[in-house]
């Protein structure tokens, strides 16, 4: 019997208070007389062991956590009763953890926690046990020894020598603790044995747990024996399944297959399905009831039924139609992007007025990093819908969209149906990412399979190959994203509403960095607003000198890089450190600037024209160089140019030859010279007709030896008659010119309508010249002496090198544009 002074019972006593380091245990209970190795990795626990090892008696208090998953337990997470133990050995391991060999000595109870840092120090009182042997204790003692002998007979891990050693223990208390250590009881049961203050109660509880464990082990052995007899040589792979069936039979649930079928039938009745789906499920369920549960076909049918009843046929989330609230969410998540936001709000407004509206199919097209995917996620949040993202990059198998037919082994539905099952809603926001990156091979064309998904007139009856029945996708709000449109087949484009997301302006990037990116990276790198502050000039330095992109992805990376360096500094100096990021410190943290942003040529050069191009990454400045060399009339075009761009170069040269006389050049100049046109950054592929007027300007400049103004950029397609045709991607090109510190831009007159899409803040710093003919371009870009005229008129304004064509031209007014 234990005497605890605290309880004030005459038969219980307790020792004087002892202050001792405490080691919280996980998944183990250390009992008196028990020796166990412990692997310790928590800092407090290692400190406690080290302190105990420094004491003369090497004592430590061992109590178990109530929840082993807690890494930093508090007082309430630890049992009050534990064991005073001795540290026999301590070994430090290479990974920073330690291995300790602990021996339990005495039971004790925590009176209070004296400290919790750098380790737990507790005041404990030893529970002093009386050694009075009553007849009840003696009877329980004998029963426990007998039960342990029985346990050793059915458990091969217990040797007869160990059983004899247990039988030789004379102390009932030590016997109980030793036997407990050889059983795999639950932690709570071992703790109950440790806390049992009365010896007879502890022995009684131990005997009860032993009998339960022996009975379970005997049943387990009996099940194993029966299963082993039932198995044949070809059924060894089904061993575990048979064992589970035998266990269920032992528990009295013999007809488990029948109960599973009954449960499945209840699920089918509870599930609301379409008429077609309900008829199909009933048909398949009848087939399943007649099949053997171990047949392969039964598994296929069961999986098919499970797929049908787990789909959200009529399950929807409530759509939020408060336009003001949705607009606030969209504005909080993204800066700018007015057109896509406006289209989403229009959809919500219509949905608020009409009970049922088919979900729109939006295609967000823009360069990387402008927020296409994150905008789709924001739309889901603004409308209170579930969000699904499916990346189509590299997808080349039609079955990814439509699924496999059930005749194939391991067949599954397509990604569309799988995603709907996952979110358990029939009206989510479905983002089909990188729709322009799909490809085609012998397995089919996934873009053609998407035609049905993205067609509002068809997707209410989408037919997946696996389900082989119609499924309604019309309530899904589908948003696709792409970098370019030319890789998307025409029929697929026709089914989507195209919304372009152009690159951000410098001002927009600055606002995005201040309002979104900096705060996000400060939080991700463990900092706070008082630790770091970015000035506007520092952000502009990053934008201009360390990034060249239409979006903000690289801008965020550079901000994250600075935050990491500041975090390292704060970790060394202290959390109260405040770092101000200026223009100079930005260069210190990020190193040498990567781009010559805003640096145009120092002087106006001959044969050097500045064009504007549009790529998947946004607008770019395109430099075109032309040199004239003695030769035999050869034209060289270099810079990894595509077919269309090479044809533009030839058209530009032909036009220059046709205007030779008016430009004051010998009509036969081309016979004695070679012309080389080069577009730098030769490793980057380039194509398209929009560099036509820049090529003409470069060639004419090289021929007449007149420089081109370095602050002028131009874009436009050239015809042989000198007309300047409209081009695409004007907004991106204008933004690129603004980023490059260009002050004057020449564009085709027919692109005037596109200027409305360009922010007024950008146009304020640019002079935009609209032209219809290449002569207007040359008059603007070539640097002439004061009073000098570019064109030299010949007799009647006709080229002198075409005398044989003079009469034909005079008689045909259609050709006036050639000589005007």
Image (tube, rainbow, N blue to C red):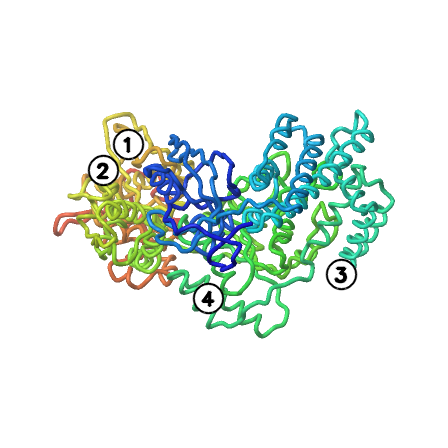
Disc 1 versus disc 4: distance between alpha carbons?
51 Å
Residue furthest to the left in view is 786
Could you say whether the residue bearing mark 2 is in a helix, strand or loop? helix
Disc 1 versus disc 3: distance between alpha carbons?
80 Å
Residue 26, x across and y down, in percent: 49, 44
Residue 702 circle label: 2
Q: Nearer the viewer, mark 4 or mark 2?
A: 4
Disc 2 versus disc 3: distance between alpha carbons?
82 Å
Could you say whether the residue bearing mark 1 is in a helix, strand or loop? strand
For marks 3 and 4, the one nearer the N-term is 3
Would you say 287 lies left or right of 120 here? Answer: right
Tag 3 residue: 270
Could you say whether the residue bearing mark 3 is in a helix, strand or loop? helix
For marks 1 and 2, the one nearer the N-term is 1
Tag 4 residue: 342
Could you say whether the residue bearing mark 4 is in a helix, strand or loop? helix
For marks 4 and 2, the one nearer the N-term is 4
Tag 1 residue: 675
Q: Nearer the viewer, mark 3 or mark 4?
A: 3
For marks 1 and 4, the one nearer the N-term is 4
Q: Answer yes or no: do the residues labelled 1 and 2 have beta carbons within 8 Å?
A: yes
Disc 1 versus disc 2: distance between alpha carbons?
9 Å
Would you say 428 lies left or right of 665 here? Answer: right
For marks 2 and 3, the one nearer the N-term is 3
Disc 3 versus disc 4: distance between alpha carbons?
41 Å
């Amino acid at each position: 019997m234990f005497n605890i002074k605290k309880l004030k019972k005459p038969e219980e006593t307790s020792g004087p208070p002892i202050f001792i380091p405490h080691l919280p245990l996980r998944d183990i209970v250390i009992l008196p007389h028990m020796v166990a190795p412990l692997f310790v990795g928590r800092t407090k626990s290692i400190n406690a062991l080290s302190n105990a090892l420094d004491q003369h008696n090497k004592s430590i208090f061992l109590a178990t956590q109530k929840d082993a998953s807690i890494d930093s337990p508090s007082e309430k997470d630890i049992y009050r009763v534990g064991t005073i133990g001795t540290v026999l050995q301590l070994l430090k391991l290479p990974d920073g953890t330690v291995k300790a060999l602990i021996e339990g000595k005495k039971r004790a109870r925590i009176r209070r926690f004296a400290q919790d840092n750098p380790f737990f120090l507790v005041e404990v009182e030893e529970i002093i046990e009386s050694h009075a042997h009553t007849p009840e204790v003696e009877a329980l003692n004998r029963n426990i020894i007998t039960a342990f002998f029985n346990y050793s007979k059915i458990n091969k891990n217990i040797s007869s020598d160990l059983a004899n050693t247990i039988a030789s223990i004379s102390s009932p208390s030590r016997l109980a603790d030793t036997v407990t250590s050889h059983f795999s009881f639950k932690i709570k049961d071992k703790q109950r044995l440790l806390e049992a203050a009365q010896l007879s109660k502890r022995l009684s509880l131990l005997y009860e747990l032993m009998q339960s464990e022996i009975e379970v082990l005997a049943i387990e052995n009996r099940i194993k024996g029966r299963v082993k007899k039932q198995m044949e040589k070809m059924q060894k792979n089904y061993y575990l399944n048979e064992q589970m069936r035998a266990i269920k039979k032992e528990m009295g649930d013999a007809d488990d297959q029948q109960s599973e079928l009954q449960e499945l039938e209840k699920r089918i009745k509870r599930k609301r399905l379409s008429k077609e789906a309900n008829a199909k499920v009933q048909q398949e369920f009848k087939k399943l009831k007649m099949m053997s549960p171990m047949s392969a076909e039964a598994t296929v049918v069961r999986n098919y039924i499970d797929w049908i009843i787990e789909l959200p046929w009529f399950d929807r989330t409530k759509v939020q139609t408060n336009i003001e609230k949705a607009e606030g969410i969209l504005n909080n998540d993204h800066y700018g992007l007015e057109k896509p936001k406006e289209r989403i709000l229009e959809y919500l407004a219509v949905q608020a007025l009409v009970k049922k509206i088919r979900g729109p199919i939006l295609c967000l097209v823009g360069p990387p990093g402008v927020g296409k995917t994150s905008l789709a996620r924001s739309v889901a949040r603004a409308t209170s819908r579930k969000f699904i993202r499916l990346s189509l990059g590299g997808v080349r198998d039609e079955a990814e969209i439509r699924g496999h037919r059930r005749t194939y082994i391991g067949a599954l539905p397509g990604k569309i149906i799988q995603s709907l099952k996952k979110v358990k809603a029939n009206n989510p926001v479905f983002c089909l990412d990188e729709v322009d990156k799909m490809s085609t091979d012998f397995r089919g064309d996934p873009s053609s399979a998407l035609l049905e998904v993205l067609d509002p007139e068809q997707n209410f009856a989408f037919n997946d190959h696996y389900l082989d029945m119609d499924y309604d996708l019309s309530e899904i709000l589908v948003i696709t994203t792409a970098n370019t449109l030319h890789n998307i087949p025409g029929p697929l484009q026709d089914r989507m509403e195209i919304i372009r997301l152009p690159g951000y302006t410098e001002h927009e990037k600055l606002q995005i960095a201040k309002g979104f990116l900096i705060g996000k990276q400060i939080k991700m790198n463990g900092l706070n607003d008082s630790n770091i502050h970015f000035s506007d000039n520092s952000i502009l330095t990053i934008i201009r000198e360390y990034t060249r992109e239409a979006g903000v992805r690289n801008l965020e990376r550079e901000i994250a890089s600075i935050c990491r360096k500041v975090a390292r500094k704060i970790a060394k100096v202290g959390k109260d450190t405040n770092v101000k990021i200026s223009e100079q410190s930005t260069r210190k943290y990020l190193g040498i600037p990567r781009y010559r942003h805003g640096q145009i040529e120092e002087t106006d050069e001959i044969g050097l024209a500045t064009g504007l191009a549009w790529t998947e990454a946004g607008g770019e400045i395109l430099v075109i160089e032309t040199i004239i060399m003695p030769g035999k009339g050869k034209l060289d075009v270099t810079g990894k140019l595509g077919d269309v761009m090479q044809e533009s170069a030839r058209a530009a040269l032909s036009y220059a030859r046709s205007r030779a006389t008016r430009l004051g050049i010998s009509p036969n100049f081309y016979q004695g010279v070679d012309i080389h046109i080069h577009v730098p950054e030769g490793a980057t592929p380039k194509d398209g007709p929009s560099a036509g007027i820049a090529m003409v300007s470069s060639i004419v400049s090289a021929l007449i030896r007149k420089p081109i103004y370095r602050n002028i950029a131009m874009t436009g397609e050239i015809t042989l008659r000198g007309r300047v045709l409209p081009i695409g991607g004007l907004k991106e090109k204008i933004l690129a010119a603004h980023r490059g510190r260009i002050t004057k831009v020449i564009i085709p007159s027919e692109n005037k309508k596109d200027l409305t899409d360009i922010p007024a803040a950008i146009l304020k710093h640019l002079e935009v010249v609209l032209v219809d003919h290449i002569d207007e371009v040359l008059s603007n870009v070539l640097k002439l002496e004061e009073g000098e005229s570019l064109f030299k008129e010949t007799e009647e304004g006709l080229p002198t090198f075409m005398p044989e064509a003079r009469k034909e031209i005079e008689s045909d007014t259609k050709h006036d544009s050639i000589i005007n």
